[in-house]
Amino acid sequence: MQPSGPEAAIVASGLAKHYGRHVALHELTLTVPRGEVFGFLGPNGAGKTTAVKLLTGLARPTGGHGTVLGRPLGDRDARRRIGYLPELFRFQEWLNAVELLELHAELARYPRHAARRRIPEVIEMVGLAGRGADRVGTFSKGMQQRLGIAQALLCEPELVILDEPTSALDPIGRRDVRDLILDLAAQGTTVFLNSHLLSEVELVCDRVAFVNGGRVVREGRVEELLAAGHELRIRARGVDRSVLAALQARWRVLAQEGERLVVGVADADEAGAVVRCLVDRNVEVLELTPQRTNLEQLFLELVEGGQNGRVDLRTPDPARSSA
Amino acid sequence: MAVWTFARLTLHEAARSRFVLLTAVLGAVYIALIAWGCHTLLDFAKSPSAAQVSAVGIEVMALFMISFVLPLVAVFVAGASTHHDGETGLLQAMLTRPIRRAELVVGKWLGAAMLLAVYTAVLAGGVIGAAGLILDYYPPHPFLAGGLLWLEALVVLSLRMLFGTFLGNMASGILPLMLYGLGWMGGLVESLGQALDIQAMVNGGITTSLVIPTDALWRGVSYFLLPSVASGIAGQAVGRGNPLVSFVPIAGPMVIWAVAYVTTVLALGGWLFARRDV
């Protein structure tokens, strides 16, 4: 199904969910452009699943507003164009895989003739070929997750929301899901991916948002976030306070102990400038290894930094995004 | 419409569960026992008219038992409560489809109501048929009796759907049955009030029938099982305050109230479920 309009796939503005005095989501503001694979990341209890429930209309926000595919949250027309795999799900165990997909096609008002063509297609797509007549109750957790992905993709949705789609899958299953997401992206489908497996998110997502304590603490394109996070691991002799001050004036000094020095730079190409800065101050550089920060490191820095009060999570530190 | 989809899903689930098979087998055993009872009575009856009187007694007692069994079946045949299904992740993927939440509640109700209709027809039809074939007594209005019996089960089913939107399986099943028990007690109090001529007790019973009209419906069933001549007993002492049988037909407004009750309780269930977070 082709996108039906130019507007963003998801817009959330100050979206909040309070359960009495407990705040599950605190003013979520984000925009997911159409056709992108968007990673929604955060620790347990950060409010990710609550956010997904608000976006899919399963729960009502207590504050703020938003749109999905240009329609208000929970709108039935928008839901017709969404595919959703919940984090915790259970299917009717007494149905077989084909019957389950037929049920979902019917509920989605997907034309019957199209469903007859599409059901074997998605069953094959998720690696369940030959198991269509088997009851869901006989499926392993991983196979049920594959079936869950099949039901999410069944009606050729414009927006696919996957909440932890690979949690029960083995490495082969994870690779298959990764390939599926990349195929969807190639077809122009918007994918909203909620996952703890950051290495996979890094491989498939165009853009990510980190959520912590019920609010977005960092959002951006993956390459930009990672570009802001190169590290130079240096072994050097003669580093004193004046040298550290000179380095800190331009870059971030992440660690220094004995001969070991870790400097955060925006671009690995800045290694030359760092070395020149050290050599000009009579520091003997013995070894230098540039290292690219991955999403996991960034995640830990944002989450643990926030918890320890080392990093202001609400406003990104300018020194981190520009040298 | 998604209502039909959910109704068919409920029927489909029932067809694949052992519960329906078990109730069918037990129902068949029950009818066989009634038939055996009728046959035994036939041997002892001194005249055809005595056999027919026995048949009335057997039918009333047998359907009275069925009127106890049907609410139990109604609670189980509705399946898990929607609250339970929401908590355990069964509904999330379905409710993000372009459906109204109320369609799920009404669809499940409709499927269960159809099963109850079949079960009522088989049990009541079996009892009336057995008594008719063996003792040669056919009540004047068997379909009205069956219809009211079904309506009685629907009252409990609707309450189960309503409570199921915010309570788990156990609580949402027990509460309607407790209310059903309250209705029966209220009917008993009303009968005693009539027998002893105590208006306050009669009023208490009427109030209970408004809270849950199941006992009033049963009395309606019992009247339609009696031979036409029974209505003459209404004004006599035996006709007043009978805790089991009514010698006057159920009041039209009470039937209307029972139908409105079922509809309103079900609509309230759909309305509440539509406003719940899942």
Image (cartoon, rainbow, N blue to C red):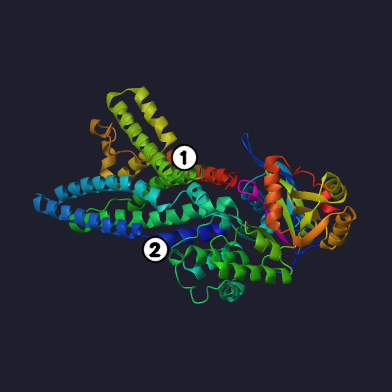
Depth check, mark 1 against mark 2: the one in front is 2
The answer to whether one can see residue A84 in this image is yes
User: How crowded is the residue under tag 2: few (<14 C-alpha within 10 Å), some, or many (20+)?
Assistant: few
**Viewer-closest of A66 and A281:** A281
Q: Quadrant of the N terminus of chain A?
A: bottom right
Q: Nearer the viewer, residue B263 or A74?
A: A74
Q: Say which quarter of the image contains residue A265.
A: bottom right
Residue B16 marker: 2
Label 1 sits on what residue type?
Trp
Relative vertical location of residue B153 with respect to residue B202 in this rendering, above or below: below
Where residue A81 appears, x then y in whole percent? 68, 62
Residue A207 within the magenta-colored segment of the rendering: no
Percent x, y for residue B5? 52, 61
Q: Chain of mark 1?
A: B
What span is in magenta?
Answer: A36-48
Which dot marks residue A143?
A: none
Residue, x 81% and y 50% (percent of image)?
A: A239
What amino acid is at disc 2?
Arg
Q: Secondary structure at mark 1?
A: helix
Q: Name the residue beneath numbered marker 1.
A: B257
Q: Position of residue B209 (x, y in %)?
A: 40, 35
Q: Give whichever of A270, B273 is nearer the camera.
A: A270
